[in-house]
Amino acid sequence: MTTALIGLDWGSTHLRAYRYDSRGQVEEKRAFPHGIRRLPEGGFAEAFAQAVQHWPDVPVLACGMVGSRNGWQEVPYLDTPTRVDRLAGALTHLEVPGGRVIHLVPGLRDPQRPDVMRGEETQVVGALAFSPSIGQRGCLLLPGTHSKWVSLRDGAVAGFATVMTGELFGLLMQHSILGAQLPADANDEQAFLRGVVAAKASDSAGALSRVFSARTLMLDGVLAPAAVADYLSGLLIGDELRMALAAGWLDARTRVQMVGEGALCERYLKAAAVFAIDIDTAPDNTTAHGLWRIATEAALVSPTAAA
C-alpha cells in the first residue's frame, strides 16, 4: 500500500519514526537514540536523514522537543484552551537538506498556572482519537519524569499541570541522605504500598512532611535498605494522586484515563486503588495515532487516504 505520511516523535533522548500507509496504519517503525541532547555527528540533519532513509518523499510531521528552544527550530506554544484543529492550523514548516519539508507541531501553554508541554499534546490528540467521549469532560494522566494532568472540556485541552514526580524520585535516590548508595532492586510491592498509604495519611500536610520517614523506617529495621526506593516511589506517586484530588484535577464526575504503558503505569494503577480512584488505560501508540490525526486535520494526507 502507498506510503502517505512519515511521522516523527522527536524528544530529548529519543527519535522514533513512523511510516504510515494510506489508511493511517503504521507500516514500519524505527527507533534511534538521537534525541535533541544526543545528536550524531552532523546534527539534526544527519539524525533526520537516518530516520527517513529509503522512505518515500511524502509529507513529514514531527512533534516533541525538536520544536523547542533547543531544538531544530523553535515553534511557539499555543495557549489553552486548544483543540486539534488549532494545533493543525499552527504547524511550522522547516525546509531541510535534500528538499524535504518537516511540519512541526506546536506545544501547549497553560497561561493560568503557567505551565507548558511539548510532545504530550500529540499523545492527547491520539487518546482523543481513540476515546472522543472523554474529551467532553475528562482528565488524562501521562506518567513520566514530569507527569502531566490534562483537563479536557468540550473536546479541547482546557488546562494542565506538571508534577515532577519522576525527577524528584531520581534526585532523592541519587543525591539525598535517603537513597544515595542504597540498593534499589528489591521491587517490594508492600514497601511501595506502605509509601502510598503514608502519602494518603499525610492529608493537607503533604508527602514532604513524611519523606524523612524513609530513613527512619530503615534505621528502625522496618524497611530493608533495598526497599527504600519502592517506599519513596509509593510516597511520591501517592502524593501526586493526593494533590490531584485536593486540587480538583479529578472528581466523581470526571473520567480519568492514563496514557502510557509499562511498569510505571502499573504502579500508578496500584496507587490509585488505595485512593479508590478508577483509572482507565488508553491504547498503546497514542503518539503515532495523534500524529496521523493532526496530519489529517492539516490536510497533509488526502481525504481519500484518511478515509
Image (cartoon, rainbow, N blue to C red):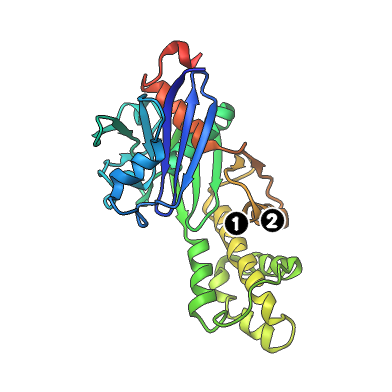
- Which residue sits at x=52%, y=53%? 247
Residue at 47% x, 61% y is 164
Q: Residues within 10 Å of mark 2 (few under 14, many from 20)?
A: some
Taking the view exactly as shown, the residue that stands out farthest to the top is 304
Mark sitting on residue 241? 1
Three-letter amino acid code at the position of disc 2: Phe
Amino acid type, label 1: Leu
Number of the label disc, if any, that sits on residue 275 = 2
Q: Position of residue 132 (x, y in %)?
A: 56, 27
Residue 272 position within the rendered picture, expressed as x and y whole percent measured from the top left: 67, 53
Q: Quadrant of residue 295?
A: top left
Between 132 and 261, the residue placed more toward the observer is: 261
Query: Which residue lies at the image location 47% right of the left edge and 18% below the top edge?
Result: 2
Secondary structure under tag 2 reads loop
Q: Is residue 152 visible?
A: no
Q: Tag 1's secondary structure?
A: helix
Q: Is residue 51 left or right of residue 185?
A: left
On the image, the x and y values in percent for residue 276 come to 71, 52
Determine whether 103 is above or below 21 in the image. Answer: below
The vertical placement of 103 against 170, above or below, is above
Q: Is residue 200 visible?
A: yes
Residue 59 sits in quarter: top left
Q: Are marks 2 and 1 in contact (CB under 8 Å)?
A: yes
x 49%, y 18%: residue: 22
